Amino acid sequence: MRRVTIGVFDSGVGGLTVLRELVARIPDADYLYFGDTARLPYGSKSRETIAKYAVSATKFLEERGAELLVIACNTASALALDAITDAANIGVVGVVEPGAESAAAATRRNKVLVIGTEATIKSHAYQHALEKRGVQVCEKACPLFVPLIEEGWLEHPVTQQVAHVYLDDVFQDFESGPDVLVLGCTHYPLIKPLLRSVAPWRVEIVDSAEATARCVAEGLRIAPPKTSEGAERRKPARMKFFATDSVEKFRSLGERFMGHALEDVQHVDMG
Ligand code: DGL
């Protein structure tokens, strides 16, 4: 199959959790990653502002040869997917629909808890996507998680305490509460082990990053490699990164999200 160029857009480094999953499923592709680090966080901004920023990033990635665009940012997917899709001349995939699809398939009780930024939760995008699939939804904004994760406090007692404050109420009565927890923010996969220890053990955690990568691979008809030899035979992914703020900051924070050093990082000025 011809090598495809996939654009990945996020407000910052968080979308690298989605890129990581994409590369694991679709290793023989070229990736252009745009992190709008100068203008983050998106999670506290209005729909209009997020749409304006996301559309300019979309045009940037398209001009550089992206043939398919993945909106890794949950906030941008929740608030601006229509605006992005209207402005784009290429296919656009957000994280909300794949995340909701995966959660709907996982719940046995038809009750799901979605956590995300203030803006994602206020948009009720996950709620609408899940209700369409006949699933009842609780939503909880967890705005402190993003700064705690960027601080590197992935297992810190403060993060643990904050998680209890956010989640204990919802999980108080497991027998009648949600049995699936959706990670509706790019950053949350990094605290999955901590969330695992806070949520009741029977609650399944659904990661929208994983669900999105699966959906993109299925869309491109790419089967997961059956053996590690098969994976090795594929040409490794080529990745180029664009950041609107400091390259150094993007590299050092991004390494933690991606799990390895980021080589080709360029600064871009969006004006
Ligand atoms: N990328 C955002 C999201 O997934 C989190 C960071 C931000 O607020 O910009 O919602």
Image (cartoon, rainbow, N blue to C red):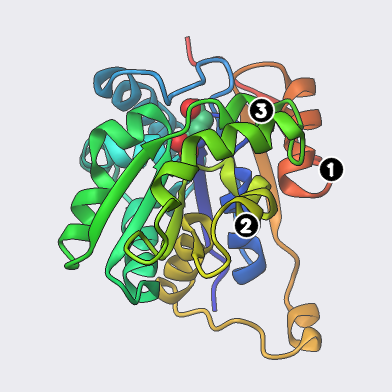
Considering only vertical position in the picture, is 244 above or below 106?
Answer: above
Along the line of sight, the residue nearer the viewer: 258 or 99 = 99
**Residue bearing the label numbered 2:** 196
- Amino acid type, mark 1: Ala
Label 2 element class: helix
Q: Where is residue 247, by image quadrant?
A: top right
- Which of the two discs, 3 and 2, labels the residue nearer the N terminus? 3
Label 3 element class: helix
Considering only vertical position in the picture, is 249 above or below 75?
Answer: above
Screen quadrant of the N terminus: bottom right
**Residue bearing the label numbered 1:** 261
- Amino acid type, mark 2: Arg
Label 1 element class: loop
Q: Looking at the picture, how far across and down is residue 165, in whole percent? A: 52, 33
- Which of the two discs, 3 and 1, labels the residue nearer the N terminus? 3
The tag on residue 148 is 3
- Amino acid type, mark 3: Leu
Q: Where is residue 261, by image quadrant?
A: top right
Q: Looking at the picture, how far across and down is residue 55, in whole percent? A: 34, 30
**Res. 92 visible in picture:** no
